[in-house]
Image: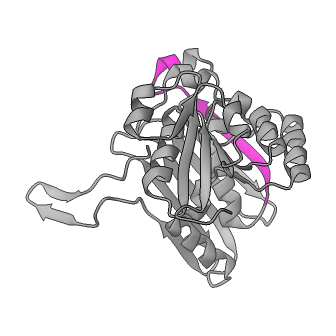
Amino acid sequence: MKSGPYTINFGIIGAGRIGKLHAENLLSRVKGARLKAITDPFLDEDWSASRNIPETGKDHRMMLDDPEIDAILIGSPSPVHATQMIECAQAGKHIFCEKPLALDPDIIRNALAEVEKSGVKLQVGFNRRFDPNFSAVQQQVISGALGEPHIIRITSRDPAPPPAEYVAGSGGMFLDMTIHDFDMSRFLSGSEVTEVHAYGAVLIDPEIGKAGDIDTAVISLKFANGALGIIENSRKAVYGYDQRVEVFCSKGTALAENNTPTSVVVLNESGTIRDKPLYFF
């Protein structure tokens, strides 16, 4: 790590909606981090200039040769994640990679082997493990205070669907969106999944169906420890980003509700009014 006013110099590959979100976080919300460079073949130069990002470009390899860059955040389209992971590892850069690492297990294993050989650190973007609410639920479960977990219920609904162009290269809803919930189900249950059953439908955007994907799903899970799980997904909840979890156990239940801008509840002749959940991008 470097000394001085900044601890870690970051580069970002990909300046789409997730890349821009990570950029905003590094620019203003992450203590001890500095965004030194961002690259994208279709970089919005007006946007990058307005953020005063020191170095920009269209080819991510410019960051691999920069000795001042300590870590690279991969926010590019999913099909190139594994290749770029290998390039970053071979360049000695620590890596944060958005999910999924790849769509083929053999490609993932090969990329992970390169990361291990290089000795760099790798983190995959399963951010919900670090959500204080979800983490607190998990701590209640693993403490044993609630007994044995019986049912894990996860509700995951986005406020708006992605463009069909994005869907076509995403690997599909299960690998792009539900992958967070698969990870959370293992995190909350403390057990591996042994059986999966799923129903999917196109109920929101016909263009998503034309791209070969679904926008609505219900998944049932069975875990090695005997617990059961339910995941429900939707690409569009008109009231906002709906993220809730519940773990029903033999001695009680732990649950986490949505984050909202405030906890204020207004009661009047029209009924009960509270803030919508926080937006996800």
Q: Quadrant of the C terminus?
A: top left
- x 30%, y 52%: residue: 276
Q: Note whether residue 208 is visible.
A: no
Residue 236 in picture, x, y percent from top left: 43, 36
- x 64%, y 57%: residue: 184
Question: Height in image: 221 above or below 171?
Answer: below
Q: Is residue 275 left or right of residue 269?
A: right
Residue 102 in picture, x, y percent from top left: 76, 35
Residue 238 image-quadrant placement = top left
Could you tell me how many numbered marks the image carries?
A: 0
In the current view of this chain or complex, which residue is farthest to the left? 269
Residue 81 in picture, x, y percent from top left: 72, 35
In the current view of this chain or complex, which residue is farthest to the top? 210
Q: Nearer the viewer, residue 274 or 22?
A: 22
Range of residues picked out in magenta: 192-208
- x 74%, y 40%: residue: 101
Question: Height in image: 1 above or below 217?
Answer: below
Question: Height in image: 52 above or below 226?
Answer: above
Residue 251 in picture, x, y percent from top left: 61, 81
Q: Quadrant of the N terminus?
A: bottom right
Q: Is residue 103 left or right of residue 255?
A: right
Residue 129 image-quadrant placement = bottom right
Residue 169 sits inside the magenta stretch = no
- x 65%, y 37%: residue: 174
Q: What colouring method underlies this structural image?
A: one colour
Q: Nearer the viewer, residue 20 or 109?
A: 20
Residue 203 sits inside the magenta stretch = yes
Q: Note whether residue 43 is visible.
A: yes
Q: Nearer the viewer, residue 66 or 204?
A: 66
